[in-house]
Image: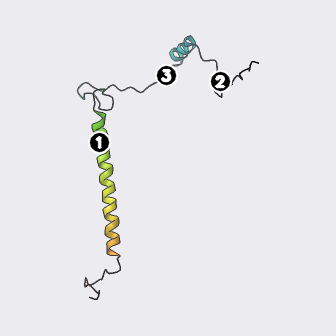
Amino acid sequence: MYKKNKVNKGGLKGKKSYVGERIEERMKKLLYTNEGVGEGSPLIYTDRRKGVMAETNIRTDRFEIALDAMYGVSKRNLNKRKSYYEIKKDDGPEANKEGVNTTQV
């Protein structure tokens, strides 16, 4: 008695294929109609006197940039928290307009 194993059909589905434009046709269109390429990555070149941008420099310490950004975020959150507690402190029940404590001893 042999047991036949069931074949599992996976749930992976591929992308639909399409016919692309040939490179020769694309080059003809670019040369004769003077239209731009339109796709591709942006140019990241700068003038030599400006130096290398930190965003594109592979030697940049990205951790330092992230720390600087998070320092600004934490500073903003602390200021927001301080302003919230200052408003709450002024609205307290023992707060008095004359500044005199009205609690009995």
| Residue at mark 1 to residue at mark 2: CA–CA distance | 43 Å
N-terminal of the pair, mark 1 or mark 2, is: 2
Q: Position of residue 51 (x, y in %)?
A: 25, 27
Mark 2 vs 3: CB contact within 8 A: no
Label 1 belongs to which residue? 67
Q: At 27% from the left edge and 32% from the top edge, which residue is drawn?
A: 61
* Lateral position of residue 1 relative to residue 96, left or right: right
N-terminal of the pair, mark 2 or mark 3, is: 2
Depth order, front residue of 79/9: 9
User: Of helix, strand and loop, which one carries label 2?
Assistant: loop
Label 2 belongs to which residue? 16
Label 3 belongs to which residue? 37
* Dot in front, 2 or 3: 2
Q: Of the residues shown, which amino acid type is indicated by label 3? A: Val
User: Of helix, strand and loop, which one carries label 1?
Assistant: helix
| Residue at mark 2 to residue at mark 3: CA–CA distance | 25 Å
* Lateral position of residue 15 relative to residue 1, left or right: left
Q: Of the residues shown, which amino acid type is indicated by label 2? A: Lys
In the displayed orientation, state which residue is furthest to the bottom.
Answer: 104
Q: Of the residues shown, which amino acid type is indicated by label 1? A: Leu
- Which quarter of the rendering shows the N terminus? top right
User: Of helix, strand and loop, which one carries label 3?
Assistant: loop
Image quarter of residue 92? bottom left
